[in-house]
Image (cartoon, grey):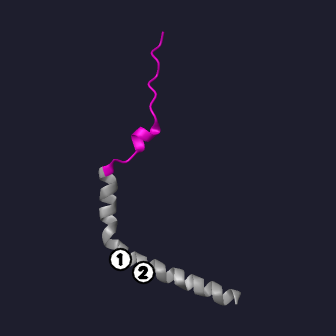
Amino acid sequence: MTQPAEHSTNAAHHSPSAGEEQDTLKALMPVIPIVLPVVGGVLMFLLAFIAIYMG
């Protein structure tokens, strides 16, 4: 008889460890003070544009 194949889930192979998540957050922290105001300005512009267009 043949040996049964070993079964494993893909999540076990592709799940990041806690250390990798912390490194990603540490890499993004210096950029957040620049990105948040820019995204806020774009959102305000879009909302004003919609208000003018609809009015």
Relative image position of residue 7 (x, y in whole percent): 46, 28
Q: Are marks 2 and 1 in contact (CB under 8 Å)?
A: yes
Q: Is residue 46 left or right of residue 15?
A: right
Q: Main secondary structure of the magenta part?
A: loop
Q: For the magenta stretch, what is the residue range?
A: 1-18
The kind of residue tagged 1 is: Pro
The image quadrant of residue 11 is: top left
Residue 33 - label:
1
Q: Which of the two residues, 42 or 1, is positioned nearer the viewer here?
A: 42
**Element type where label 2 sits in the image:** helix
The image quadrant of residue 55 is: bottom right
The kind of residue tagged 2 is: Pro
Outermost residue on the right side: it is 55
Residue 37 - label:
2
**Element type where label 1 sits in the image:** helix
- Mark 2: few/some/many CA within 10 Å (<14, 14-19, 20+): few
| Residue ID at (47%, 80%) | 40
Relative image position of residue 12 (x, y in whole percent): 41, 39
Relative image position of residue 51 (x, y in whole percent): 64, 87
